[in-house]
Amino acid sequence: MEVLAVANHKGGVGKTVTAVNLAAAIAARGRRTLLVDMDAQGHATMWFVDDPGQVARDLQDVLGHGVPMEEAIQRTRVPGLDLLPATLALARLELDLVGMTRREDRLKRALAAVADRYEIVVLDMAPSLSLVSVNGLAAATGLLVPVTPTQLAVAALGTFMGWLEEFRREGVVSAALYGILVTMGDGRSRAQKDVLAALADSSWPVFKTIIPKRVAVENQVSERWTPGIPGERRGWTDVADAYRALTKEVLRIIDRGGA
């Protein structure tokens, strides 16, 4: 089972949009997929749950109270895609984890119980380096790091990558970096050209796909649609094409055994 964490400690770089659309597009290609919402804001959950207040079990119950993961998992409207939801209760988990033993690998152990049910797990990480986020990083076998094409975002990316290396040295993280994903791209922007040049000069792998900046994409949470899924909504072809292209890139990495 592949566990792909969509992660960056900086907010506003398109983590949830990427995680949801990537997970849905992977499932649409016939691979059993689980999307795990690891953010107490629950934006990934809102994509598929009409009333998050009616969620009976969520990630907090699994990691904090030992509830079996299969009791918290829900089906989504996308065939082949299931969801482990998050609610505001997840915010308290940080305090609970402090007093627990083996707190960094609780998600990894919980996922092992459903390893025969899913080919790919996509983790929508919170914009933080909390103990909950460390659980996601520790469980991951691969990392996808979204970044917007601005100098500030790239500077923050350098800090995040430095933290990842510290976690590797400490034996907490072993996931391969599958790639940096440029989101909210604008091909006419000088800033984007400068950022792409800087990424090209770095040692980090960078996805060829760039997710274009569109108001429609930014409104996806309220509209609850996934452009990469045929028939769910027409239009915004470049956005749908970008997510499908990204999915192909990710699956090629997975199928060849990693980055």
Image (cartoon, helix red, strand yellow):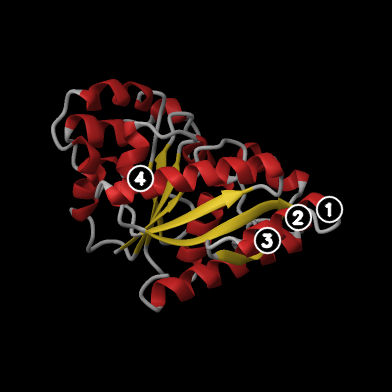
Q: Which amino acid lies under the numbered mark 3 shown in the image of this protein?
A: Ile
Say whether residue 38 is left or right of residue 72.
Answer: right
**Residue bearing mark 4:** 166
Nearer mark to the viewer, of 4 and 1: 4
Q: CA distance from mark 2 to mark 4?
A: 28 Å
Mark 4 and mark 1 lie on one chain; the one further toward the N terminus is 4
Q: Looking at this rendering, what residue extends furthest in the right direction?
A: 188
**Residue bearing mark 1:** 190
Quarter of the image for residue 240 reads bottom right
Q: Residue at x 30, y 56 (%)?
A: 174
Q: Residue at x 33, y 66 (%)?
A: 119
Q: Which amino acid lies under the numbered mark 1 shown in the image of this protein?
A: Arg
**Residue bearing mark 2:** 194
Residue 153 image point, x, y percent: 64, 42
Q: Which amino acid lies under the numbered mark 2 shown in the image of this protein?
A: Asp
- Quadrant (top left/top right/bottom left/bottom right) for the N terminus: bottom left
Mark 1 and mark 3 lie on one chain; the one further toward the N terminus is 1
Mark 4 lies on a secondary structure that is helix
Mark 2 lies on a secondary structure that is helix
Q: Which amino acid lies under the numbered mark 4 shown in the image of this protein?
A: Glu
**Residue bearing mark 3:** 210
Nearer mark to the viewer, of 1 and 3: 1
Q: CA distance from mark 4 to mark 1?
A: 33 Å
Say whether residue 163 is left or right of residue 22.
Answer: left
